[in-house]
Image: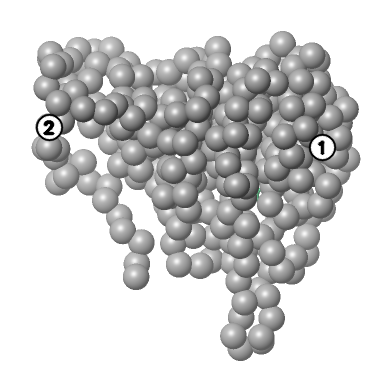
Amino acid sequence: MPCKEEDNVQETFPLRLYPWQKARGPSDLSQNRLSVTLAGLKLASPTMLASGILGYSAETFESIAEGGAGAIVTKSIGLKPRSGYVNPTVVQVSCGLVNAMGLPNPGMDEFAHEIRRAKTVLRVPLIASIYGYSEEEYAQLAKKAVMAGADAVELNVSCPHVKQTGSEIGQSSELLAATVKKVKTIVDKPVIVKLSPNVTSIADLAEVAAKAGADALTAINTVKAMVINAETGMPMLSNRVGGLSGPAVKPIALRCVYDIFEQVKIPVIGCGGITSWRDAVEFLLAGASAVQIGTAIAMKGPNVFSSITRGVSVYLRKNGFKDVNEIVGLSHHRQ
Ligand code: RRO
């Protein structure tokens, strides 16, 4: 079955009116109804570049921001350079991608130059994604990233397939709490924690991160997955196991955001299969204050930011909302 695409704002309106929509008066077209403040970061649009896609150079950050992204998250960076796994590292499947890149990155000392360069041109917040093998490493990386100019850090505690980092930290309440606490003692910029869906209760781990001092949460990283080639009889990825992203994971990600919003008060950033304005609206209604976009860039190109932003804006106007923040978590309202 092909992935369903519903991106045309003109054809899909007017929506059915729900009780919460009827009470609203006419909206002011002149204001920027899309701006959000997230853990102290000011975003002109609630769309962000997700970590892992086009996340390496100041030039690509700039072009993504010019394309309409409200913030940029870098590729995950560690203390030492890493070449990642050998090819094949990405396989296309129905409605998504399965990747096992293996954390390729130049190491923070090298990448700090890129952060500095990016900060001279970027007008949107730059968030450094970092991964480590201990709480001390996360803290060192956070300090280096912030000293280079990063506006916030996103702790990648959820990579599904690299040993002794990623989800091995994010799946353990003790390691997760210790990591977040340590980073919070070192930096005074917002600390965002990217959570794994490969757990029994993502909301419980969200609560652990929040209690340890996290300023916001990103939900979700990729879903642990694999692909086998019937012709060769072998797994397709060199690492055998990887992470599934794209429209295939959207309902999982949406449920995760919904569950977290019910249990935890800090802002949630939705991530997972957001491809159209309608997907973005669904995440906002589930409780996301902003959304990250990754795989859709590979599928549709960087203009996906402006098409999603435009669509969300039209949705808000047509339904009488003055401000994107008014719809955050609305699906939780009970009549
Ligand atoms: O680099 C990767 O293989 C990777 C990472 Br760091 C991650 O967080 N999630 C993912 O699916 N792949």
- CA–CA distance between discs 2 and 1? 48 Å
- Whether residue 310 is visible here, answered yes or no, is no
Name the amino acid type tagged 1: Gly
CB at disc 2 and ligand 1 closer than 8 Å: no
Residue at the bottom extreme? Answer: 231
Q: Locate residue 176: give its quadrant.
A: top right
Residue at x 52%, y 24% (from the top left corner): 264
**Relative to the observer, which residue lies in front, 143 or 297?**
143
Q: Position of residue 249 (x, y in %)?
A: 48, 53
Who's the residue at 66% across and 86% down the image? 233
Residue drawn where x is 70% and y is 39% of the image = 170
Quarter containing the N terminus: bottom left
Q: Earlier in the sequence, mark 2 or mark 1?
A: 2
Asked which secondary structure carries label 1, the reply is loop
Marks 2 and 1 close (CB-CB < 8 Å): no
Colour scheme in use: one colour
Task: Determine which of the numbered discs, if any, sits on residue 132 in the image.
Answer: 1
